[in-house]
């Protein structure tokens, strides 16, 4: 067995209604909280004594993080609290990390910056996810978009794991069906990719299998009826499992593609992953030599994982990549950039440029 490590959020609190515990939890770190939210901050600002809030609309940009850090310093924040989808949680994570560093963001961010390790402990950070998708509440990185470079890059360090991950499935009740579908498919993708990736290990395997089982029985139910709390709870746990797994094992080609696509086009991360999952799984399944884990997933997904994944993609009305402005003429550049992405390095097989283009064309 290869050497492996395992780390996750310092404290995970999971259950219906646990959002009510947030004020007391935040007060453990001080009285000056900076609240990071999505496009509807009013629903959260009454729940938490705070000194300021910042909204994140869409995936966080370099400018979002820089302005958030200025705000945290201006208010002398004791703790950063992020309530929202994966983009909001990533933004809060990055703001908490950068608020204490002696250098600017470009010193620490990967790809577009120097990629240096963080030099100071981040501010305490509480993650409260609302979409059951990226599992960002249990990861050690924050994905940040650079419009200048047309790319998404990560700020990454072990110390960026949240102090508290507060997961309440009731927060997703009013999530629109298309967001439920895209975020849920992202969580499923992360469980599947982490399970078969080259850095998989026993502890993450167990989490992945549990997450996959929950998505199989509950993703469509949550899509069809957002008020089905049993289904919402299953998907919240699937997302949490996926975040822990990817942080400790890795991902694969789906996320290798998602990184450049997210930087080149205004395409939601979850929707991109959802469109690519079936074609990537089909290509990997054809190419992989040790089929033990792929056979295991086939058995879990009705005997034929490829057919099941294509079918659920249609049933959840996942848009094709072309819906986001991607054309055949873009595929070569996307494939070249994807080949260099960090997630691609853990894919269970090494895919050629032509195979990457074939996958993209199938999702177009």
Image (cartoon, grey):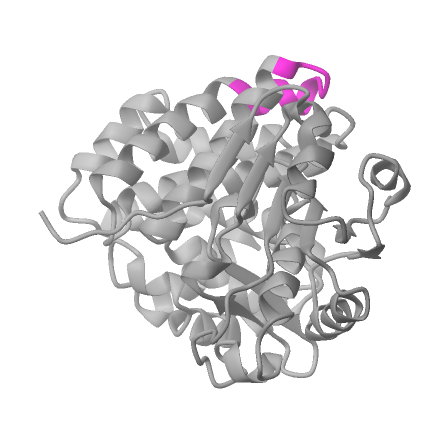
Is residue 153 visible in the rendered image? The answer is yes
Q: Is residue 349 above or below residue 65?
A: above
Residue lying farthest left? 1
Q: Is residue 106 above or below residue 322?
A: below
Residue 330 on image: x %, y %:
58, 72
Decide which of 220, 32 is in the foreground and name it: 32
Is residue 355 visible in the rendered image? The answer is no
Decide which of 8, 33 is in the foreground and name it: 33
Give the residue displayed 85% in from the left and 56% down from the top: 52
Q: Is residue 269 above or below residue 242?
A: below
Decide which of 244, 195 is in the foreground and name it: 244
Residue 59 on image: x %, y %:
69, 59
Give the residue displayed 81% in from the left and 70% down from the top: 74
Within the image, what quadrant is residue 353 found in?
bottom left
Q: Is residue 27 above or below residue 301?
A: below
Residue 136 vs residue 298: left or right? right
Residue 75 vs residue 92: left or right? right
């Amino acid at each position: 067995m290869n050497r492996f490590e395992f780390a996750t959020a310092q404290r995970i609190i999971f259950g219906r209604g646990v959002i009510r515990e947030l004020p007391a939890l935040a007060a453990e770190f001080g009285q000056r909280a900076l609240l990071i939210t999505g496009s509807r901050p009013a629903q959260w600002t009454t729940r938490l004594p705070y000194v300021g809030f910042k909204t994140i609309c869409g995936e966080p940009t370099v400018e979002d993080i820089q302005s958030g850090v200025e705000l945290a310093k201006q208010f002398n924040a004791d703790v950063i609290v992020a309530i929202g989808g994966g983009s909001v949680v990533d933004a809060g994570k990055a703001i908490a990390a950068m608020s204490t560093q002696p250098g600017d963001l470009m010193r620490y961010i990967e790809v577009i910056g120097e990629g240096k390790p963080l030099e100071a402990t981040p501010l305490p950070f509480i993650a409260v996810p609302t979409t059951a998708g990226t599992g960002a509440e249990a990861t050690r990185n924050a994905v940040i978009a650079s419009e200048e470079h047309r790319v998404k890059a990560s700020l990454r360090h072990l110390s960026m794991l949240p102090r508290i991950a507060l997961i309440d499935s009731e927060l997703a009740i009013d999530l629109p069906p298309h967001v439920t579908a895209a975020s849920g498919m992202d969580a499923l993708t992360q469980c599947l990719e982490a399970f078969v990736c080259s850095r998989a290990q026993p502890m993450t395997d167990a989490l992945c299998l549990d997450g996959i089982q929950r998505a199989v029985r509950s993703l469509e139910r949550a899509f069809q009826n957002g008020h089905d709390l049993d289904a919402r709870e299953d998907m919240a746990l699937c997302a949490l499992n996926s975040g822990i797994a990817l942080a400790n094992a890795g991902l694969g080609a789906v996320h290798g593609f998602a990184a450049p696509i997210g930087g080149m086009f205004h395409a939601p991360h979850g929707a991109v992953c959802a469109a690519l999952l079936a074609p990537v799984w089909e290509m990997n399944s054809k190419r992989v030599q040790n089929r033990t884990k792929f056979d295991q997933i086939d058995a879990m997904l009705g005997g034929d994982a490829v057919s099941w994944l294509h079918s659920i993609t249609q049933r959840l009305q996942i848009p094709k990549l072309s819906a986001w402005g991607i054309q055949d003429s873009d595929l070569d550049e996307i494939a070249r950039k994807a080949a260099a992405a960090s997630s691609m390095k853990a894919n269970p097989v090494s895919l050629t440029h032509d195979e990457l283009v074939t996958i993209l064309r199938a999702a177009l």
